[in-house]
Amino acid sequence: MTSHTGRLYALAASLAAFFVLWAAIAANPWKAAAGDPRLAALAQRQQLLRRDARIVRQIVQQRTSAAAARAKARSAAAAAPPAVRVVTLPPLVVTRTS
């Protein structure tokens, strides 16, 4: 290349390529962007609430089954036949000789 114009174009193109490459490397496209800390806190709070809800559901289920068992026992006791009583009665016929 003996023309000055060609050399200037080559220099301009190499400088442009250098700065574009520099900007691409400085941007770190291979590195994952750091997440928003508020979103991380929100996700953690959501997990906590789900765990608490699961515990509450278990407690409610236990109480409901215990109440049903008590109601069933009450209805069985009310529907049970009365206890048998043994009664000794005097004889119905009294025979006397005259």
Image (cartoon, helix red, strand yellow):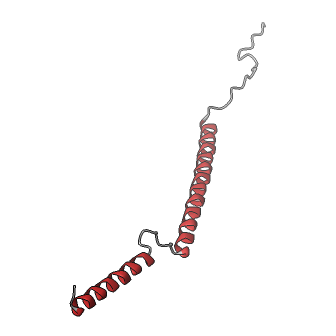
Residue shown at 55% from the left, 75% from the top: 38
Q: Is residue 79 above or below residue 42?
A: above
Residue 13, percent across and down? Answer: 28, 85
**Whether residue 57 is situated above or below residue 91 in the rendered picture:** below
- Point 62% across, 53% down: residue: 59
| Quadrant where the image shows the C terminus | top right
Q: Is residue 22 left or right of residue 57?
A: left
Residue 75: image quadrant is: top right
* Residue 66, position as x, y percentages in the image: 63, 46
Decide: is 55 above or below 82: below
Residue occupying image coordinates x 30% and y 87%: 11
Quadrant for residue 78, please give it.
top right
The residue lying furthest to the top in this view is 97
In terms of image quadrants, where is residue 55?
Answer: bottom right
x and y percentages locating residue 39 in the rendered image: 52, 72
Choose between 61 and 17: the one closer to the eye: 17
Q: Which one is nearer the viewer's eye here, 54 or 6?
A: 6
Residue sitting nearer the eye, 21 or 44: 21
22 left or right of 69? left
Report the number of discs. Answer: 0
- Judge from the rendering whether residue 40 lies leftward or rightward of residue 14; answer left or right: right
Indicate the position of residue 69 as horizontal and vertical percent values. 61, 43
Q: Residue furthest bottom?
A: 4
Q: Quadrant of the N terminus?
A: bottom left
